[in-house]
Image (spheres, helix red, strand yellow):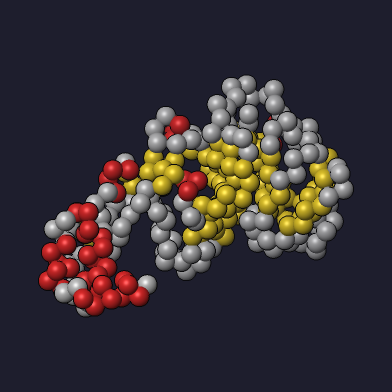
């Protein structure tokens, strides 16, 4: 750190400005010019390479001065891996107010459970995008606030299943499915205070996500282990037969989603 400060002190604004002509050192020059009190003529939204894109191909983000680094969705810092299987990953996506993700690339089907969008709760709205398998997509996401942007996302990197019924779980009705495609299946349930749901057993890996901002939910596995959820975005991965119980005094809404494989 001391060496860096010494270098900045010795570097004249004229020398730093000359670095702007060299693409390799442009990002460094912008920082040094700022520390020297000299305007680089570049802004966060506009650079000498043009406006900073919010979506496009990975090469579209090259040449800007932030600097920008394009990463895979699993390597984007705000997309936190909270559970990883052989061909799927559960992500807890959290973007603070005023923050923007790195440009990140989607290359497989994904199932979103929207918890909040920065302006309020979204009640666990479900959405799935499968076209990324055919054509990778790179973009950035900005949260204007004032609250937290949060999604519990399930990403699949497997082939999916074509038959819609061979892998149905016991304890849940096919007619109650809210979303289904070859890669994912999801249900939405509301338990009244004190209510219990009979045993559920999945063939596929499954997750339980509380989507109501208040209330309590117990996910009671057959081995006696209980996962206690009490806020929107809390989740459990029972990975064996389980029962659901609302021990609280108000209704609680949850989403059960599974990755088909």
Q: How many marks can you see?
A: 0
Residue at x-position 77% and y-position 53%: 227
> Which quarter of the rendering shows the C terminus?
top right
Q: Position of residue 97 (x, y in %)?
A: 46, 66
> Which quarter of the rendering shows the N terminus?
bottom left
Q: Position of residue 13 (x, y in %)?
A: 16, 73
Residue at the front extreme of this rendering: 3
Q: Is residue 132 above or below residue 165?
A: below
Nearest the viewer among 9 and 93 is 9
Q: Is residue 145 above or below residue 114?
A: below
Residue at x-position 80% and y-position 63%: 249
Image side of residue 187 versus residue 182, left or right: right
Nearest the viewer among 166 and 122 is 166
Residue at x-position 65% and y-position 61%: 213
Whether residue 195 is visible to the viewer of this picture, yes or no, is yes
Q: Position of residue 256 (x, y in %)?
A: 68, 43
Nearest the viewer among 141 and 225 is 225
Q: Position of residue 136 (x, y in %)?
A: 40, 36
Whether residue 251 is visible to the viewer of this picture, yes or no, is no
Residue at x-position 87% and y-position 48%: 224
Q: Is residue 61 above or below residue 19?
A: above
Nearest the viewer among 122 and 261 is 261
Q: Quadrant of residue 252?
A: bottom right
């Amino acid at each position: 750190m001391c060496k860096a400060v010494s270098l900045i002190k010795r570097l004249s604004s004229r020398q730093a400005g000359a670095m702007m002509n060299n693409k390799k050192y442009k990002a460094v020059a912008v920082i040094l010019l700022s520390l020297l009190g000299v305007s680089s003529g570049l802004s966060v939204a506009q650079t000498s390479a043009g406006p900073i894109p919010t979506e496009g191909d990975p090469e579209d983000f090259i040449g800007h001065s932030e600097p920008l680094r394009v990463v895979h969705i699993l390597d984007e810092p705000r997309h936190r891996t909270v559970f990883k299987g052989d061909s799927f990953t559960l992500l807890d996506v959290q973007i603070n107010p005023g923050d923007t993700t790195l440009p990140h690339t989607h290359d497989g089907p994904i199932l979103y459970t929207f918890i909040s969008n920065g302006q309020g709760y979204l009640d666990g709205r479900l959405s799935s995008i499968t076209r990324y398998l055919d054509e990778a997509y790179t973009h950035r996401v900005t949260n204007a606030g004032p609250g937290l942007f949060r999604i519990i996302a399930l990403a699949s990197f497997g082939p999916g299943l074509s038959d819609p019924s061979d892998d149905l779980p016991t304890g849940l009705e096919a007619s109650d499915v809210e979303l289904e495609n070859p890669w994912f299946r999801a249900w939405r349930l509301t338990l009244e205070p004190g209510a219990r749901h009979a045993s559920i057993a999945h063939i596929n890996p499954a997750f339980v996500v509380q989507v109501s901002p208040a209330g309590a939910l117990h996910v009671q596995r057959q081995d006696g282990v209980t996962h206690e959820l009490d806020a929107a975005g809390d989740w459990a991965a029972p990975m064996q037969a389980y029962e659901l119980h609302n021990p609280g005094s108000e209704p609680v809404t949850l989403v059960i989603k599974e990755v088909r494989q």
